[in-house]
Amino acid sequence: MIKIKFLSVGKTHEKWLEEGIDMYVKRMSPWAQFEFIWLKDASQLEKALSAEKHVVILDPKGQQVDSHRFADWFFKKVEQAGSRLTFAIGPAEGFSEKVKAEYEAISFSQLTFTHQLARLILIEQLFRAFEIKKGSAYHK
Amino acid sequence: MIKIKFLSVGKTHEKWLEEGIDMYVKRMSPWAQFEFIWLKDASQLEKALSAEKHVVILDPKGQQVDSHRFADWFFKKVEQAGSRLTFAIGPAEGFSEKVKAEYEAISFSQLTFTHQLARLILIEQLFRAFEIKKGSAYHK
């Protein structure tokens, strides 16, 4: 079982977003378990990251991926990381230079999203990665 | 009042996605009206586009934008287009070469999204564009 943590600043208040994220969590339940951790602010996030082993940050300046490259990257990473991976979603002001220098960064888009929407996009791409691996019709 | 049409293939069935899109539609109601049109398939979408005046397609190979550039582009475009703009979201297999050659294309990401998620991302970026123009704290 793959165990994935999401670390982000500020909790999601929109019910519809939680429902969307829950839908993907349930769909992935045969393969992966998720844990969502909310931190109060950027410095708390930074502190929490330093306690994690295999951290990937989502940052517009990171390595640009399409869905296939993300899937390939993800499964390689998961293997290296002994099935334990931590994704960090940046605070509104972005990650500090220190964090950016320290961790591997993946870029989904040049756009700025709310961190809530970023969580939804990340979890949909993780679900898509599993579907790509299975060779299902979800990812055409 | 700006009038914006979204053309896409296949209707959204997920209730949470409709709620999310509705939330942004309501937030933009002082400035913009939205119309969502669903087509049966790619050829119906193509036909519908030919009847529209100012069409922009969302395509991974289009002009890459960040949120600020998208906002600038959007308000210029809206002015040129007499406040009537039509966004087309590609079918699962992507747009045909004919469509890609004919219309201006904007790229939000190299990732593949469900067309439902693409609608949510587009409408959030439109809301963000209005907030950027107002200089609000939404877009930091």
Image (spheres, coloured by chain):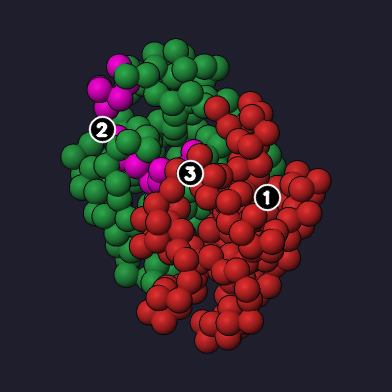
Chain colours: A green, B red
Q: Which amino acid lies under the numbered mark 3 shown in the image of this protein?
A: Arg
Count of numbered tags: 3
The residue pinned by badge 2 equals A104
- Label 2 crowd bin: few (<14), some (14–19), many (20+), radius 10 Å: some
Q: What subunit carries mark 1?
A: B
Left or right, A55 with reference to B40: left
Residue of label 3: B69
Q: Is residue B16 something one can see in this rendering?
A: no
Q: Viewer-proximal residue, A73 or A2? A: A73
Q: Earlier in the sequence, mark 3 or mark 1?
A: 1
**Residues at marks 3 and 1, common chain?**
yes
Q: In this view, does A136 lie above or below B46?
A: above
Q: Do labels 1 and 2 share a chain?
A: no
Residue A99 belongs to magenta span = yes
Q: Residue furthest right?
A: B30
Vertical placement of A7 versus B85: above or below? above
Label 2: element kind: strand
Please tell me whether mark 1 sits on a helix, a strand or a loop.
Answer: helix
Q: Quadrant of residue A105?
A: top left
Which residues lie in the magenta part?
A: A98-112
One can see residue B20 in this view: yes
Residue highlighted by disc 1: B20
Give coordinates of residue B97: x percent, y percent.
38, 79
Circles 3 and 1: CB distance less than 8 Å? Answer: no
Q: Distance between the residues labelled 3 and 1?
A: 24 Å
At label 1, counting other C-alpha atoms closer than 10 Å, the crowd grade (few under 14, some 14-19, many 20 or more) is: some
